[in-house]
Image (tube, coloured by chain):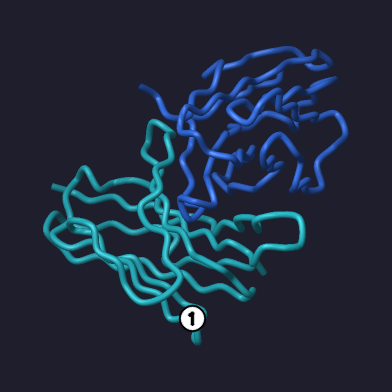
Chain colours: A cyan, B blue
């Protein structure tokens, strides 16, 4: 079992729908990242959070440290939101490093017009 | 003004060859990473350097050798390429001052024939 699990693995939505992608993790973390990978392959960092909630445009990310769970929400979804969304957790820093990212398997989102 | 640039974008080579992938960041970050994304789109960290010093070295074959001539560059050299090395390799950078938010390069698609 992966240390970071995302659900669903695949998601198809109609334009305008509210979308939620979930991420659960089983390790101690110092932060959690949400990344977006477009069909062309490039990876963009959407959010990095260690508590509470962050909002950027139509995207909202929340994290519950006690429950080891995070959600990424997309409001008023649009076909250009179609991409793979990846959750990654940063392990706490060690004596000689800043921690490392452990990735979920990604959620492939397709938004249809 | 690409923040993290990797070259080449595509690399097709024969088994047994030696190849290098270059990565440069102009963000002034002090930490750089190499990630491998397999055919199932699963990302995994390979190496991390902080101020030219290796701080994370995952279980990666010795054929892979990262080199950081300065903190803006982290190159990846691969000896005796094998079929299983075919993947997309992503370089990324971050800084402690920036809260370790990751900036990714566009990726290098390596195909070993």
Q: Residue at x 45, y 50 (%)?
A: B98
Q: Residue furthest bottom?
A: A66
Q: Nearer the viewer, residue A58 or B4?
A: B4
Horizontal and vertical percent position of residue B90 = 56, 34
> Left of B85 or right of it: where is A46?
left
Give the vertical position of A110 relative to B92 (above or below): below
Q: Which image quarter is the N terminus of chain B in? A: top left
Give the vertical position of B49 relative to A75 (above or below): above
Q: Chain of mark 1?
A: A
Marks counted in the figure total 1
Q: Residue at x 63, y 68 (%)?
A: A3
Residue ID for mark 1: A65
> Left of B50 or right of it: where is A78?
left
Horizontal and vertical percent position of residue B21 = 65, 20
Q: Residue at x 37, y 36 (%)?
A: A39
| Quadrant position of residue A73 | bottom left
Q: Secondary structure at mark 1?
A: loop
């Amino acid at each position: 079992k992966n240390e970071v699990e995302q659900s669903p693995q695949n998601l198809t939505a109609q334009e305008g729908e509210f979308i939620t992608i979930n991420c659960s993790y089983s390790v101690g973390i110092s932060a959690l990242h949400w990344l977006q990978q477009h069909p062309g392959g490039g990876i963009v960092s959407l959010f990095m959070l260690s508590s509470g909630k962050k909002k950027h445009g139509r995207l909202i990310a929340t994290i519950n440290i006690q429950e080891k769970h995070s959600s990424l929400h997309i409001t008023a979804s649009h076909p250009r939101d179609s991409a793979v969304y990846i959750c990654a957790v940063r392990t706490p820093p060690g004596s000689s490093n800043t921690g490392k990212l452990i990735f979920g398997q990604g959620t492939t989102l397709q938004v249809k017009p | 003004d690409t923040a993290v640039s990797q070259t080449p974008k595509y690399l097709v080579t024969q088994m047994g060859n030696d190849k290098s992938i270059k990565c440069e960041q102009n963000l002034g970050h002090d930490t750089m990473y190499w990630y491998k994304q397999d055919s199932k789109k699963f990302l995994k960290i390979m190496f991390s350097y902080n101020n030219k010093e290796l701080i994370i070295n995952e279980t990666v074959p010795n054929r892979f050798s990262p080199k950081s001539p300065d903190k803006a560059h982290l190159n990846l050299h691969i000896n005796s390429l094998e079929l299983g090395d075919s993947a997309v390799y992503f370089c990324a950078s971050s800084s402690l001052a920036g809260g370790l938010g990751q900036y990714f390069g566009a990726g290098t698609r390596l195909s070993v024939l």
